[in-house]
């Protein structure tokens, strides 16, 4: 074995260089994303929905957010029966305003795609320049447990799961039941989509929610805990951040699930009050 001798001064210089390199490397690996999540009223009135999204943009701009998440169906309404031209018109204005502020979007809306004329329940992703990155379609569609099943499973199409990049960070989207696979709400098996996104390299999952609730005991003592526990456990299992936003209409009783930011250890780092229109802004630090 050949041993090369170094003079003390050269050895000290080498150690300093190595330590400096290590610190620099650590700093270079630290990446942040300032997220805004909007708990908004989702109606069947597209113009009122757009106005709510613009209010959320006001807060996102003021809070220097880099991406805004809105609930499931937040622009179109949570329905397959909507005015596509009106959605396109309002969407264009929202994207233009967001991009002028450098804010990316994870925008929940139902949408009829021009390539197959099929309606999808989507999260549409735009980067901070307004470039359309693609969309996630709700996959674990809700239905009755009858044979044949009834419900949205018969109204919306699905497309393969995919990831996107915002500021060089791999992200994914899920919509409501995609996260928790409520056995009372679907006849489909749970495909564990959050884990699949994690395995595909996603560091952050944007979860758009519009869950049913009526303010009763089952909503409070069963559905809410089921949703929150699944969110926390699946964030921890996949070691991913989860950013969530629920519909708050009507505001006479609590939302169906928490809106906020979950860390990869399953702990909340930011969380909305359970009722009403709320915007939470939080800086996620990835290492």
Image (spheres, rainbow, N blue to C red):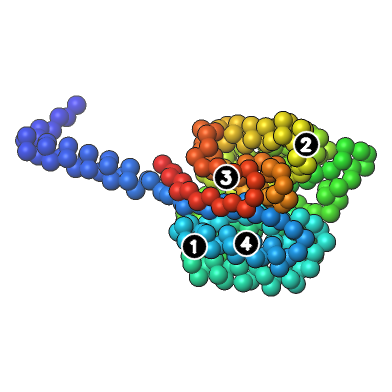
Nearer-N-terminus badge (2/4): 4
Mark in front: 4 vs 3: 3
Mark 3 sits on what residue?
Answer: 272
Residue 231 in the image: x percent, y percent? 62, 36
Report the mark closest to the observer, 1 or 2.
2
Q: Residue at x 6, y 38 (%)?
A: 9
Is residue 279 rendered to the left or right of residue 148? Answer: left
> In this rendering, does residue 238 appear at all?
no
User: Of label 1 and label 2, which has the lower sequence position?
Assistant: 1
* Residue behind mark 1: 61
Contact? badges 2 and 3 (CB < 8 Å): no
Kindly state the secondary structure of the residue where label 1 is placed: helix
Q: In this figure, which residue is indicated by the disc labeled 2?
A: 216
Nearer the N terminus, badge 4 or badge 3? 4
The residue positioned farthest toward the right in the image shown: 147
Disc 4 secondary structure class:
helix
Q: Residue at x 84, y 43 (%)?
A: 143
Look at the picture and state if 117 lies above or below 210.
below
The span from disc 1 to disc 4 (Cα, nearest Å) is 12 Å
Q: Which mark is residue 53?
A: 4
Distance from the alpha carbon under mark 3 to that under mark 1: 18 Å
Tag 3, which secondary structure? loop
Q: Earlier in the sequence, mark 2 or mark 3?
A: 2
Instruction: Work out whether mark 1 precedes mark 4 in sequence or the reverse, and give the earlier one.
Output: 4
Q: Secondary structure at mark 2?
A: loop
């Amino acid at each position: 074995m050949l041993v090369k001798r170094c003079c003390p001064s050269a050895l000290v210089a080498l150690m300093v260089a190595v330590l400096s390199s290590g610190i620099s490397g650590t700093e270079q690996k630290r990446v942040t994303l300032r997220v805004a999540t909007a708990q908004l009223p989702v109606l069947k009135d597209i113009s009122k929905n757009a106005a709510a999204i613009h209010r959320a943009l006001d807060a996102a701009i003021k809070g220097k957010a880099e991406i805004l998440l809105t609930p499931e169906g937040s622009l179109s309404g949570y329905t397959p029966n909507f005015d596509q031209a009106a959605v396109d018109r309002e969407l264009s204005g929202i994207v233009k305003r967001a991009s002028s502020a450098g804010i990316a979007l994870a925008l929940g809306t139902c949408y009829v795609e021009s390539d197959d004329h099929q309606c999808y329940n989507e999260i549409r992703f735009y980067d901070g320049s307004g470039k359309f990155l693609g969309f996630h379609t709700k996959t674990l569609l809700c239905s009755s447990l009858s044979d044949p099943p009834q419900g949205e499973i018969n109204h919306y199409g699905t497309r393969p799961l995919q990831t996107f990049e915002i500021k060089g960070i791999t992200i994914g989207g899920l919509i409501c039941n995609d996260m928790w696979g409520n056995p009372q709400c679907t006849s489909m098996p749970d495909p564990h989509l959050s884990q699949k996104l994690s395995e595909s390299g996603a560091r952050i999952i944007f979860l758009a929610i519009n869950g049913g609730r009526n303010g009763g005991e089952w909503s409070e003592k069963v559905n809410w805990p089921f949703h929150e526990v699944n969110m926390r456990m699946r964030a921890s299992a996949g070691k991913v951040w989860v950013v969530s936003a629920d519909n708050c209409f009507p505001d006479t009783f609590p939302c169906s699930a928490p809106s906020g930011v979950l860390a990869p250890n399953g702990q909340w780092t930011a969380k909305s009050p359970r009722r009403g229109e709320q915007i939470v802004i939080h800086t996620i630090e990835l290492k």
